[in-house]
Amino acid sequence: MSIEVQLITRRGVLQGMFSAGALVLGAKYLPAATDATAASWWPTVYLGIEPDGRVAIIAHRSEMGTGIRTSLPMVAADEMGADWKQIKVQQAIGDVKYGSQNTDGSCSIRDFYDPIRKSGATARLLLQRAAAQKWSVSPEECVARDHKIFHEKSGRSLGFGELAAAAATQPMPRPDELKFKTPAEFKYIGKGVPIVDQNEIISGKAIYGQDARVPGMVYASIERSPVIGGKLNTVDDTEAKQVKGVLDTVTLDPAKPPYLFQALGGVAVIGDSTWAAMQGRKKLKIDWTPGENASYNSTGFKAKLQATVRAPQKSWRNVGNVDDEFGKSGKIVEAEYYAPHLSHAPMEPPAAVADFKDGKVEVWTCTQNPQAVQQAVGSALGIDQKKVICNVTLLGGGFGRKSKPDYAVEAAVLSKKLGKPVKVTWTREDDIHFDYYHSVAALYFKAAVDGKGRPTAWLQRSAFPSLASTFSANADAGSAGELGMGFQDVPYQVPNLRVENGPAKAHIRIGWFRSVANVYHAFGVQSFTDELAAAANRDRVEYLLDLIGEPRKIDFAAEGTKYGNYGKPQDVFPVDTARLRRVIEIAAEQSGWAKKKASPGRALGIAAHRSFLTYVATVVEVEVDAAGKVRIPRVDIAVDAGQIIHPDRVKSQFEGAAVFGASLAMMGEITAANGAIQQSNFHNYPVARMNEAPFETHVHLVDSNAPPAGVGEPGVPPMAPALCNAIFAATGKRVRELPIKRTKLV
Amino acid sequence: MIQLKVNGATRQYDGDPEMPLLWYLRDTIELTGTKYGCGMGLCGACTVHINGEAQRSCSVTLKDAAGKNVTTIEALHPAGEHPVQKAWKQLNVAQCGYCQTGQIMQAVALLKKKPRPTDKDIDDAMQGNICRCGTYQRIRAAIKVAAGEKA
C-alpha cells in the first residue's frame, strides 16, 4: 500500500479544531490500484500548526493503556522537528475519513507509523520552503529543529507559528521530494516521552467512559436474560418503580443471532442516579424462557470438545505424511490440553452516554472502535451512521472487550425511547455475565520421535467455538484468522507435519481477547514441546532450538498452506526462524538459564511464540512451596518487535502481559451452567493481585531495523506455557489444563 | 440530613442513607477521580481516605460516612505533586490509568503508617487494589521512590 499526504483544503471535517490561520495536513492512504476502493482517498491522521506555534495532532486510535495517544503524535513531532512541549493531542471522533480506528490486533504503530511520518515530513518541508521564500534562500539550506526553521549560514530563524500561514500557501510536495530523518536524527522516536494523559490520570481528572456526563442525563441499569437468547415472558416492575430515585422502566427488544454488536435486550431501570437505577433493578420480577442455549454446560461441553480432537478433522496444514510415519515402529508421544473461557474484565466496566435528538445521536463512550459504534448504533436506530457522532473517552482497559460496542447501542436505544440523554453503566456483574468471551479450547498432540527424541512426525488438533459465531450464526469451526494465530504457523522443522481443527458450536458470545487464539495454541504447542524434551531428557532451550531448526523464512505457499500472517505480506513480515531463535537465546542468557539448575520446588521454564508479527521468548522462574502455592520471583522476556518507537511503553506492555498471562494461567476460568455464566465478580473470577503477580519482569528488546510489529498482545501467549513448564521442572507435575489451580501440585 | 466533609468542604445530603459514598462522590458532587470497579470492596479502584484511613468508598454508606472527613484523589495535592504522585510520574506507572487513583490513595495511606515499607508491607497494603494492566512492579518501585523522597 502506498501512502501520500495531501493538504486539506476543505476544512469542514476539522471545524472547531483549528483556527483560520492554521496549516492543516492530513496523511491519507492511497489504496493499491487493484483495490476496489481505489477511487476514494481515506484520511487517517491530521496534523495542524496554529499561528501561535502549537502543533495539534489528532489521535484517531483509542487509548486503553498502550500509550498510543502519545506514541503516534510523538512520531509526527519528531519528523517535523517540533518541540514536544508545544504539541497538543486531540482525540478524534469516529469517522471513516481517518481509515480504520479499530484499536485492536496490535496494529496501530505498524499501520500508521509511515502515514504519520509522511505528515510530519511534509509539514517540515512546507515550513522549510516557506522560510526559504521569506529569506530568498534555497530550501535545502533551511533546517527544522526545536519548533523553528533555521538558516544556519545567516543565523536567522523563524518559529513554526510564524511560518504556518506562508507554509499553507506552498504547493504540496510530491512524495519523492519528502526526506525522512535517519534514526541518528531522531529526537523522540526510539526514545520516548511521558504519556500525554499522565498528569490527568494521577490527579483524578482523566475522563473515562464511566465518567462521561452530559447535562440532563438519566441513569440506566439493565437486567438481561441470564442465558443468551432467552426470551422475556413477563416483567413486574411495581416494586422497582417504588424505589426512591427510579424514574421509569423500559423494555428492550431481545437480540437475535448472530449477536454482532446488538444490544442484548432486557429491562432497563431508569433512575436519577446510578445507585437508584441499580437498586430499582434489584426489585424487578422477570420471568425468562432461557431458550436453546440453556443446554450449555461447561463440563459436558469439555467432553465434547475432547472427543472432537481425538478424531481426524479438517486439515489446515499438511507437510509430508504424518499417518505413514505414525504407522512405523518408532516411539509415539501423545498429550491433550484444555483451556477454559476467559472474561476480559477490564478495570473499567463498559459504560456509554447517548443523546438522541432530531434524528441524530451523539455518543460518549470508552470504545476501541468508534466506527463500529457508528455502524451498530446507526443500524439499531435505523439512521445513517454519519448521524452517529461517537466521542471517544479514555478506556479503563480494553483487551478486546471494548471493540464490541453493545453497551453504546443500549444507551442510544434508550435515549431515543426516552427523548433525553441516557447513561448506561455496566456493573462488574454485567461485565462478567455478558462478555464476548475468550473461547474455551481443547487440543490434541501426537508425535513420532527418533532416537534423540526429535519428532519425525507432528500432528496437532484443536477445537473451539469460533469468534466468527458472533458474526455468522452458521460458523461452527475455527476460522482462518484463528488458525493463523500460532497453530497453522507452528515454526518447527519436522518432515511430517499436520495441523487440524474440528467443529464446535458456540452457546455464548465469543469474542477476541488480548492475543486471541494464540493463548491456547501457544499453551498447547509450547507445553507439548516441553513434554517431548522431558521425555528425551534434553535441555529445554537446546531442544526448542533444535525443533525450530535452521534459520529460514518459512515458505507456506510452497508447501500449499494458505497462511494469513495477520493480514500482512510474508515478504515484508516473514515467519523468520532466525529471529525466533535469537529471542530464545537472549531470554536464556538474560535469565541465567544455564546457571540456574532446577531444584525441588524451584525451576525455570521457557516458551517462545510469534504472534502479531513479533517474536517473543519468555523464561519464567517459579517457586512451588510445600502447600503447592506458586510464586513467580522473576520473568525474563526477550522481544523482537522490529523497530521500537517508544521503548518504555513497549516494556510496560510486556511487563503487563506477564501479569495478564500469569493471571489467566493460574486462576482465570469462566464456566457456564444451564447456559448461564457462573462467575460474577473478582471473588469468583479472580485476577492476579500484586502478591500473586510476577515479582519482577525484565524485558529485553532486540535492536532491529525490521518494520515495526505488534506489542500489545504478543507478551501474553508464551506466559502460560513457560509457567507450566517451570512448574513441571520444579515439581514433576505436568499441567495440561488451565487454570493451574485445577492441578494438585504437591 | 447527613452532614460530612469532602475535601475540606462541609456537605449536606438528604437522599438514600444506604447509598454508597462512591456514588455520592461520582454522581452527586461529580468527583469522578474515585472509580467504580466492582462495588464489593474487591478491587480498590474506589479507595478514598476517611478520617485519614484508606477505605473502599463502594462499601461505605452515606449513613456511615456521616460526620466523617473524606479526602479524594482530587484533593491529595492541589497540583498533583504529592510525593506519591510525583513518584508515579517519575516511573511512568500508569498504563490505562483507571485503577491508579485508588492505588495512589492506598499507597499514601500505607506510607503514612509505614514510611519505609518492606516488600511484604507493600504486598499486604496493596493486594486489595487490582491493576488489570499489570503495573504492579512499577507501583512497588514508585512506593519505594516516594518513601525515599519523604525521608
Image (cartoon, coloured by chain):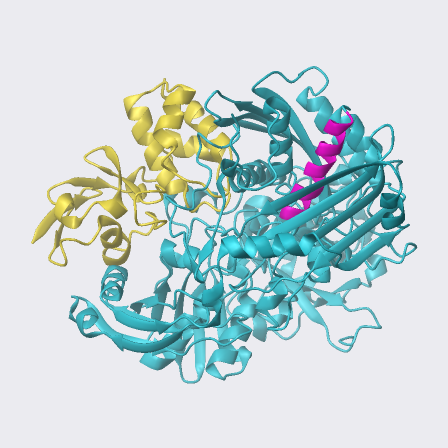
Chain colours: A cyan, B yellow
Toward which corner of the image does residue A634 lie, by quadrant?
top right
At x 37% / y 20%, what residue is drawn? Answer: B117
Task: Name the side, left or right, on which A396 lies relative to A99.
Answer: left
- Residue A573 appears anywhere in the view: no
Quadrant (top left, top right, bottom left, bottom right) of the N terminus of chain A: bottom right
| Dominant secondary structure (helix, strand or loop) of the stretch shown in magenta | helix
| Above-or-below relation of A457 to A389 | above
Toward which corner of the image does residue A97 lie, by quadrant?
bottom right
| Above-or-below relation of A693 to A244 | above
Name, please, the residue furthest toward the left: B1
B114 or A28, nearer to the observer = B114
A715 or B94, nearer to the observer = A715
Q: Is residue A429 magenta?
A: no
Task: Name the side, left or right, on which A244 lies relative to A138.
Answer: left
Task: Name the side, left or right, on which B62 lies relative to A300.
Answer: left
Residue A545 % position (x, y): 81, 32
- Residue B28 appears anywhere in the view: yes
| Above-or-below relation of A69 to A93 | above
Residue A173 % position (x, y): 79, 63
B55 or B25, nearer to the observer = B55
Residue A571 % position (x, y): 87, 53
What segment carries the magenta color?
Answer: A518-536
Residue A488 % position (x, y): 77, 52
At x 84% / y 72%, what residue is drawn? Answer: A33
